[in-house]
Amino acid sequence: MYTIVTASQKGGSGKTTLSGHLAVEAEHAGAGPVALVDTDPQGSLSQWWNARAAQTPLFARTGLMNLGETLARLANSGVRLTIIDTPPAITESISYVVGFADLVIVPTRPSPHDLRAVGATVDIAERHRKPLVFVLNEATSRARITGESAVALSQHGTVAPVTIHHRVDFAASMIDGRTVMEVVPNSASAREVAELWLYIQAKLSRLVRDPSLIPDFQPEHFAVNALLADDECEEDDEAIASAAKPSVEPPPVVPIYAGPERRVNSPATRYSGVERRAVFGRRRVEVP
């Protein structure tokens, strides 16, 4: 059994909604049996699942001290994939749950406050040596700050090549325990969730070295030649940037300076006309 943890210390980042949608899409894509685990004392994911008519994905509500036992029971019952929703702001709780993860997903809204709050979650994942993927969530279409946020995050980890945009149908679908894929299956929201899961599925397959998880279909607009395998990520920043250079006119170069702390002089770190230090410290750049 493989375990995905959605984690963010910033409240309102969309962890619960994303967890439910990814679990339903994973089940639909044949990655199941899938189980959801709610470790948030608020129980938002529990309330959504209780309102759900469908029997899948499976669900388990557990306390932190019983999480290991719960995961063992799910594995013994034949569950193939577990997605765990975590509480916000409680560092010790998030750290404990991340220790069980095969992959950590960090939903982040494209705003300066959310970007600054991501650092603590990144530190937790690094302390446990767990792979991490940022997902830009609740983004505004064609907003400049969305692209700037992706650039800023890419300096410190892998950013999923699919952005989840802010739309009313996400919240509306959660009212009665469904998802946008079930309420409006042909919508842009449903396509974004499906494409995000394809990327997560392929990423997880490489991490756990399980070819059976590799999806049969990969959209051309984030073809795998743009997603470097994990063993290729030790190349230096210059080589990665060169390999990822598009055939059309390239965007402005983001200079990265070596040293105890890296500073990025780019629009992604310049707010209200004031140049600011990059949100985090030194990180390896990965091309999503």
Image (cartoon, rainbow, N blue to C red):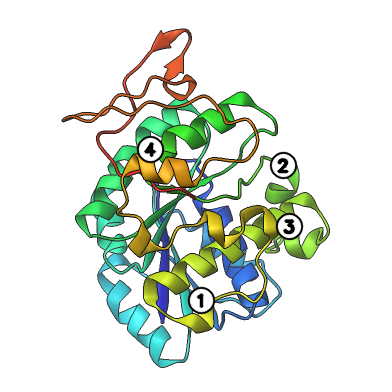
Q: Mark 3 or 1, which is nearer the eye? A: 3
Q: Nearer the viewer, residue 235 or 210?
A: 235
Question: Compared to 159, does 177 lie above or below?
Answer: below
Amino acid type at mark 3: Ala
Circles 3 and 2 in contact, beta carbons < 8 Å: no
From the viewer's perspective, is 152 left or right of 30? left
Q: Nearer the viewer, residue 37 or 6?
A: 6
Q: Which residue is mark 1?
A: 35
Sequence-first disc among 3 and 1: 1
Q: Is residue 104 visible?
A: yes
Q: Which residue is mark 2?
A: 167
Q: Mark 3 or 2, which is nearer the eye? A: 3
Quote the CA–CA distance across marks 3 and 2. 11 Å
> Which corner quadrant of the image does residue 190 belong to?
bottom right
Q: Is residue 61 visible?
A: no
Residue at 52% across / 78% down in the picture? 213
Quote the CA–CA distance across marks 3 and 4. 29 Å
Crowding at label 4, few (<14), some or many (≥20) Cα neighbours within 10 Å?
many
Q: Secondary structure at mark 3?
A: helix
Residue at 66% across / 42% down in the picture? 165
Q: Which residue is mark 3?
A: 190
Sequence-first disc among 3 and 4: 4
Amino acid type at mark 2: Arg
- Return the x and y of residue 1 as percentages of the image width and height: 41, 82
Amino acid type at mark 1: Ala
Q: Which residue is mark 4?
A: 155
Q: Mark 4 or 1, which is nearer the eye? A: 4
Quote the CA–CA distance across marks 1 and 2. 26 Å
